[in-house]
Image (cartoon, helix red, strand yellow):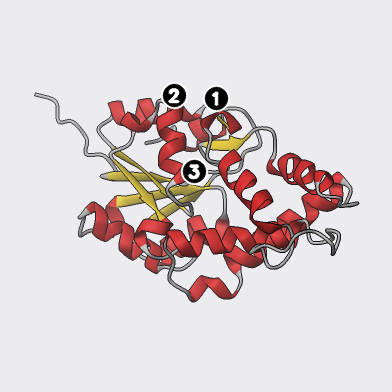
């Protein structure tokens, strides 16, 4: 009787944004529209660069060593919105968005990105997941996100593909803090961390931090439509 080779891993964890799914259209479009409606004179390209810098600052800056939860994630995104469209006229009614646009613009952007139709799956995401599941791997999403991710996955009709959904706001830490992975491993209930593979598009958070926490990891470079299929072809 032939011996079936054992899988290299028990679990494969995928980052969400930039790995399995992406906002469509790009987030800067929604931010720019909100800014213009409130009187901002920022160009679209300026908003795009501001958003990129704000994301880096608030996900990879001082907050790396701070615990998180749903409230903390909302505060993080308030700061990102404020930093992105921060040239708003001073006579706007004050709100709690760092004294800038009030709660309305933050709420509209927060809700916009909570809707499944604001996102699209990469065309190779489900084929890759389906192939890996057919091989016997358990599949999880491991993402810096909040409870909106569950709504998005449900709205896309793909929740059933995942054996676990691991979200920073529920785990208590966000990548690149290695405690994100400590909490994820604890949630899954596996003892041998070498039997977990993390795949994502961000080197510091998805690869370096995962390896520091004892997992194996692979960096996804989305330079072609079948990038994820090619990256996992040997599994």
Instruction: Give the distance between the C-alpha atoms of the residues marked 1 and 2, in whole angstroms.
Output: 8 Å
Which secondary structure lies at badge 1? Answer: loop
On screen, residue 56 above or below 22: below
Q: Please tell me how crowded label 3 is: few (under 14), some (14-19), or many (20+) other residues with Cα within 10 Å.
A: many
Identified at 58% across, 47% down, the residue is: 110
On screen, residue 41 above or below 210: above
Which residue does the numbered mark 3 point to in the structure image?
16
Q: Is 180 on the left or on the right of 117, as rendered?
A: left
Identified at 68% across, 50% down, the residue is: 105
Residue 20 is situated, as x and y percent measured from the top left of the image, at: 50, 37
Residue 194 is situated, as x and y percent measured from the top left of the image, at: 30, 57
Q: Nearer the viewer, residue 145 or 225?
A: 145
Q: In terms of sequence position, does the residue under pointer 2 or pointer 3 come before the other?
A: 3
Residue 131 is situated, as x and y percent measured from the top left of the image, at: 36, 26
Identified at 57% across, 63% down, the residue is: 76
Which residue does the numbered mark 1 point to in the structure image?
123
Residue 3 sits in quarter: top left
Q: Nearer the viewer, residue 141 or 48?
A: 48
Which secondary structure lies at badge 2? Answer: helix
Residue 220 sits in quarter: top right
User: What's the mark number on residue 127?
Assistant: 2
């Amino acid at each position: 009787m032939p011996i079936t080779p054992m899988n290299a891993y028990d679990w494969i964890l995928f980052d969400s944004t930039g790995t399995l799914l992406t906002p469509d259209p790009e987030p800067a479009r929604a931010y720019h529209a909100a800014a213009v409606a409130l009187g901002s004179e920022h160009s679209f390209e300026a908003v795009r660069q501001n958003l990129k810098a704000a994301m880096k600052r608030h996900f990879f800056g001082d907050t790396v060593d701070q615990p998180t939860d749903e409230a903390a994630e909302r505060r993080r995104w308030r700061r990102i919105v404020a930093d992105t469209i921060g040239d708003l006229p001073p006579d706007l009614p004050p709100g709690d968005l760092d004294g800038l646009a009030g709660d309305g613009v933050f709420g509209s952007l927060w809700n916009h990105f909570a809707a499944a139709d604001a996102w699209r799956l990469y065309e190779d995401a489900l084929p890759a997941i389906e192939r890996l599941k057919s091989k016997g791997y358990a599949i999880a999403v491991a993402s810096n996100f909040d409870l909106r991710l569950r709504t998005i996955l449900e709205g896309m009709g793909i929740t059933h593909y995942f054996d676990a959904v691991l979200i920073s706001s529920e785990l208590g830490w966000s990548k690149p803090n290695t405690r994100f992975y400590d909490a994820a491993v604890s949630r899954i209930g596996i003892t041998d961390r070498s039997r977990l593979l993390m795949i994502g598009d961000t080197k510091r958070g998805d690869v370096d931090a995962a390896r520091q926490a004892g997992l194996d990891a692979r960096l996804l470079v989305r330079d072609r439509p079948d990038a994820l299929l090619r990256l996992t072809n040997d599994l």
